[in-house]
Amino acid sequence: MTTTEARAARLSPPSASDLFRVDDLLTDDDRLIRDTVRAMVRERVLPIIGEHFEAGTFPAELIRETGRLGLLGMHLTGYGCAGTTAVAYGVACEELEAGDSGLRSFVSVQGSLAMFPIHAYGSEEQKQRFLPEMAAGTRIGCFGLTEPDAGSDPGSMRTTATRDGGGWVLNGTKMWITNGSVADVAVVWARTDEGVRGFLVERGIPGFTTSDIRHKLSLRASVTSELHFDSVALPESAMLPGVSGMRGPLSCLNEARYGIAWGAMGAARACFEAALEYSKARRMLDGPIARFQITQAKLASMATSLVQGRLIAHRLGTLKDAGALHPVQVSLAKRANVRAAVEVAREARTILGANGITLEYPVMRHMNNLESVLTYEGTEEIHTLIIGKAITGEDAFS
């Protein structure tokens, strides 16, 4: 493209869903990833996701597809992982969640919650054994931290691992675990006499069972399970040797929250685009409802939220790539972008009217999913207090 052509492109009207040309901040590699994942979502996800949501099933046929595209653990290096930038990973999360939060959750749990702790804290033998197959999508992982009585306060976990000769015995229950019953390996965090430690618990080991959580009204196209450990005997080699204490699981949560800050904007964009298209096609009083001032006000508010959220996400990514990311910035981005996405989805539903509650359109599906996204990986209230502590220096948790 010549200088004149580039200038003309910059002066052309921006797209409705990218009024500040945030995409211009992306590199050529970022755009290639964006376009590749967007095409996969359009061709492979959108035609089937409504049926899976209604049936309460996960589209397992997409697992190998995400592995083939290099999306699993894509921000990690070596061991079959793509080694992309944080921004590129964020772009992929945005496009995946434009399809469905359940799909982005699968990729996020696999890469940020299961593969990341093995990559960061595992032994070389653990990395070689698990990561290549997990990157390919031939081995699935899950992350066991939340418990029935320890959600927003993971430090109160009751799951324990006690020394027994040359190994460990694991007892306890984990709840609200994405991928739980389909996982080949669970990264489980437990109390020990040495502090909180992570353990790799493989499917089929005696005493380890799972049960799925049914009757969900959100994240229906996602597997959500309980993990049960009844005197599970583990060898010493099952423990992650590189970390002890809450720093381990909390660092994993920050990785996942990062992807959520991007992904939520994908869901918001999908809702906005559906509402915009509908407003142009739906006619009332001899014209499209897009001409109504109230409709335009709603669309303008949604477009503004998209700009703000995508700028926050991109800045978060550049900070992460520069090695300058602070956890409070992740909390702010997760809190702000998910809340904005929830509001965009609700506003979009009003434009679609009664049609907005059907699976013919993606809005209600995204709106229901975002209610879970608002809660998991740290509730809105928890992130509010994290930001409050950073601002005031006063700890509301003590």
Image (tube, rainbow, N blue to C red):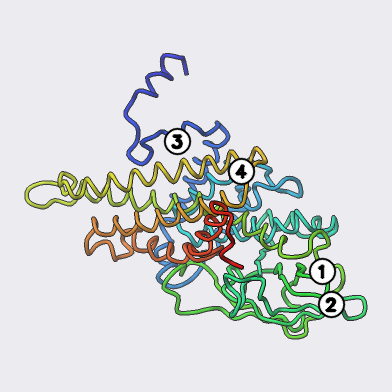
Amino acid at circle 3: Val
**Which is nearer the N-term, disc 1 or disc 4?**
4
Residue toward you, 375 or 245: 245
Are dots 2 and 3 in contact, CB under 8 Å? no
Q: Is residue 161 above or below residue 219?
A: below
Residue drawn at point x = 53 percent, y = 64 percent? 382
Q: Which mark is residue 208?
A: none
Where is residue 32? Give x, y as percent.
Answer: 54, 37
Residue drawn at point x = 87 percent, y = 71 percent? 236
Q: Which mark is residue 238?
A: 1
Where is residue 106? Give x, y as percent.
Answer: 57, 61
Which residue ends up furthest to the left in the rendered image? 286
Q: Which mark is residue 86?
A: 4
Q: Secondary structure at mark 2?
A: strand
Q: CA distance from mark 1 to mark 3?
A: 44 Å
The residue beneath circle 2 is: 168
Residue toward you, 156 or 373: 156
Mark 4 packing: few (<14 Cα in 10 Å), some, or many (20+)?
A: many
Q: Secondary structure at mark 3?
A: helix
Mark 2 packing: few (<14 Cα in 10 Å), some, or many (20+)?
A: many
Left or right of residue 159, residue 180 in this image: left
Where does the C terminus fall, quadrant-wise? Answer: bottom right
**Which is nearer the N-term, disc 3 or disc 4?**
3
Q: CA distance from mark 1 to mark 4?
A: 29 Å
Q: Of the residues tagged 1 and 3, which is closer to the observer?
A: 3
Are dots 1 and 4 in contact, CB under 8 Å? no
Q: Which mark is residue 22?
A: 3
Q: Of the residues tagged 2 and 1, which is closer to the observer?
A: 2
Are dots 3 and 4 in contact, CB under 8 Å? no
Residue toward you, 315 or 61: 315
Amino acid at circle 4: Ala
Q: CA distance from mark 2 to mark 4?
A: 36 Å
